[in-house]
């Protein structure tokens, strides 16, 4: 850094790449005061080199807002996010996609402070921009819808939250399919909104579906961990994990392929550890499931 300062001057734009590298290290090491000081220097250099209304400078103000938010300096965080928003709106127009960054930051900041009405306003503005630029069925709308739904829930408007969460779930399903682990939270959100309105019959299957997704994910993780324990020659630990997985997965038809795979792995372990009677019993159960679902693969 000193060599660059000597060669180019302490306020030269040539220092920006090196300053950004040092800033990243400071952030990783949680040296927050140092990170803010470095970013202040970067901002001063950009202001001098590019002008106070540079779109690149807006990005630095947004980074500063996030640093302030992490340190719970909420007043400074709001001021710097607004600076970024004003610059981008003036330079790129009020509906440019780049505005969604500071709008999202303000939404998260207001939500953190329980300023839910303010959060709703900026999150809706971000949603309008994304819909206009990306289209109404873009999967990129889903995270913003989830955040907006959580704010509407806090404002005690469950029917509206339900509609938002339903739309978000549909977009997540479009992107991820019907059984992705990330769907569980969206299903919970929608079920909660319905239950708040006493729509218990509609909430129940959503909660049940979320539970099945989590059971599948947990069963897969247990199975994979058991295989690692086997590789480490920790057979007793592996057996305990297989037993837990079998108990979790039994009795749910949608999880039978995963149960079949778990039983097969468990049977292999029992055979290798010279317990042929128990191994045959477990392998027989796996074979029965394989015969019942010949075209379904374990997930």
Image: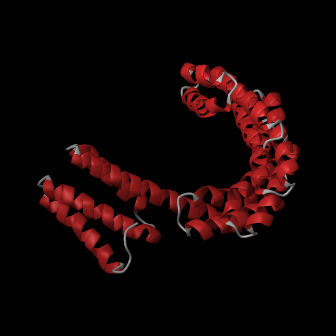
The reply, left or right, for residue 13 in relation to residue 254 is: right
- From the viewer's side, name the closer residue of 212 and 51: 51
Position of residue 58 relative to residue 213, above or below, is: above
Q: Identify the image quadrant of residue 237.
A: top left
Residue 201 horizontal/vertical position (percent): 70, 68
Q: Residue at x 84, y 58 (%)?
A: 95
Residue 34 horizontal/vertical position (percent): 64, 21
Could you tell me which quadrant the C terminus lies in?
bottom left
Residue 16 horizontal/vertical position (percent): 63, 32
- From the viewer's side, name the closer residue of 197 and 138: 138
- From the viewer's side, name the closer residue of 299 and 50: 50
- From the viewer's side, name the closer residue of 41 and 101: 41
How many tags in the picture?
0
Residue 51 horizontal/vertical position (percent): 81, 36
Q: Residue at x 77, y 45 (%)?
A: 55
Q: Residue at x 23, y 43 (%)?
A: 234
Q: Identify the image quadrant of residue 270.
A: bottom left
Could you tell me which quadrant the N terminus lies in?
top right
The reply, left or right, for residue 56 in relation to residue 117 is: left
């Amino acid at each position: 850094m000193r060599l660059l300062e000597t060669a180019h001057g302490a306020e030269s734009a040539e220092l920006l790449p090196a300053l950004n590298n040092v800033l990243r290290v400071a952030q990783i090491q949680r040296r927050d005061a140092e990170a803010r000081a470095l970013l202040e220097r970067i901002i001063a250099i950009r202001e001098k080199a590019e002008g106070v209304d540079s779109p690149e400078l807006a990005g630095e103000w947004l980074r500063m807002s996030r640093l302030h938010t992490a340190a719970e300096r909420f007043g400074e965080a709001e001021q710097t996010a607004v600076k970024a928003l004003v610059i981008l709106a003036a330079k790129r127009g009020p509906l440019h996609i780049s505005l969604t960054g500071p709008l999202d930051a303000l939404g998260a900041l207001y939500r953190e402070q329980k300023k839910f009405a303010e959060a709703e306003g900026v999150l809706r503005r971000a949603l309008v921009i994304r819909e206009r630029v990306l289209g109404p069925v873009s999967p990129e709308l889903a995270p913003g819808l989830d955040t907006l739904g959580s704010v509407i829930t806090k404002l005690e408007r469950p029917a509206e939250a339900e509609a938002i969460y339903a739309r978000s779930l549909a977009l997540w399903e479009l992107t991820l399919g019907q059984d992705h682990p990330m769907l569980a939270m969206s299903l919970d959100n929608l079920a909660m909104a319905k239950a708040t309105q006493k729509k218990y019959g509609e909430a129940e299957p959503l909660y049940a579906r979320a539970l099945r997704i989590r059971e599948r994910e947990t069963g897969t993780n247990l199975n994979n961990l058991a295989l690692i324990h086997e590789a480490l020659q920790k057979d007793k630990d592996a057996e305990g994990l297989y037993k837990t997985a079998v108990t979790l997965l039994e009795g749910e038809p949608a999880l039978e392929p995963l149960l079949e795979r778990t039983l097969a792995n468990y049977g292999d372990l029992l055979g290798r550890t010279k317990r042929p009677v128990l191994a045959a019993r477990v392998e027989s159960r796996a074979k029965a499931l394989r015969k019942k679902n010949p075209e379904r693969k374990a997930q």
